[in-house]
Image (tube, grey):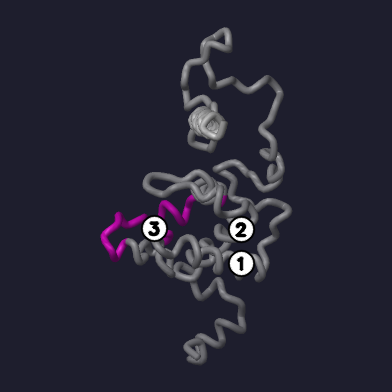
Amino acid sequence: MNSLRAKFTRVMLLAGVACSAVAIGGCDHLRQDMGTQPKYLPLEPSDFFQDGRSERPLLENTVARGAVANDDLLLPKDSNAFPASVPVTQELLERGKERYGAYCTPCHGLQGDGNGMVVMRGMKRPPSYHSERLRESANGYFYDVITNGFGQMYGYAAQIPPRDRWAIVAYVRALQLSRNAHAADLPVELRQKLSSGDGAK
């Protein structure tokens, strides 16, 4: 009787182990993470859609969610204005200086002459903001380059909010003026300060 019970216990134990092994082995397909989730890769064909494409065209008269949130800050590339909601004030210039220091100086340098730290380490030198071409470029051009990138420069749309991009544009304009301004353009009190020699203090 005892041997029969021992055999039964052994069989039940083996059956339990076998069932556990099958269950554990079969659960692997239930484990899903971002790497194994069902998804289409870019431009992968699809049997689901009639045209065989997984990439779907935008529906007519639709706009991607969130895309119009900053429309009032978007001006054409050839516009030399600033958006009406971004007045050029001392606060905007200070913000632009701070953001320029964080994002732009590694390549463009503190003075905007293209002698940033990464250039000193061997990377390609960007053009100087003080070149005639960039002094004559529109504000909208600078905003577009910050947003979308140009040449070797990546776009900063994901890192720099639109209002801060305009602050950087304003600061770049201030950098350009600081190197290319004429004494006659200064207010009277600053001209007097320069002529008396106090401008260096």
Image depth: mark 2 or mark 3 in front:
2
Q: Is residue 111 visible?
A: yes
In this rendering, the answer to whether 155 lies above or below 22 is: below
The secondary structure type at the circle numbered 2 is helix
Q: Is residue 114 left or right of residue 178?
A: left
The residue labelled by disc 1 is 95
Q: Count residues near mark 3 (Cα–Cα under 10 Å), then give few for <14, some for 14-19, many for 20+.
A: few
Front one among 129 and 157: 157
Asked whether 4 falls inside the magenta stretch, the response is no
Q: Position of residue 97 (x, y in %)?
A: 55, 68
Q: Residue furthest top?
A: 50
Q: Are marks 2 and 3 in contact (CB under 8 Å)?
A: no
User: Which badge, 3 or 1, is on the more N-terminal residue?
Assistant: 1
The residue labelled by disc 3 is 131
Q: Residue furthest front?
A: 1
Q: Are marks 1 and 2 in contact (CB under 8 Å)?
A: yes
User: Which badge, 2 or 3, is on the more N-terminal residue?
Assistant: 3
**Which residue range is magenta in the image?**
119-139
Q: Position of residue 75 (x, y in %)?
A: 63, 44
Q: Is residue 201 left or right of residue 70?
A: left
The residue labelled by disc 2 is 164
Front one among 55 and 168: 55
In this rendering, the answer to whether 67 lies above or below 136 is: above
Residue at (51% x, 87% y) in the render: 199
The secondary structure type at the circle numbered 3 is loop
Report, in whole angstroms, how far the alpha carbon at label 2 lies from the one at label 3. Answer: 24 Å
Amino acid, disc 1: Arg
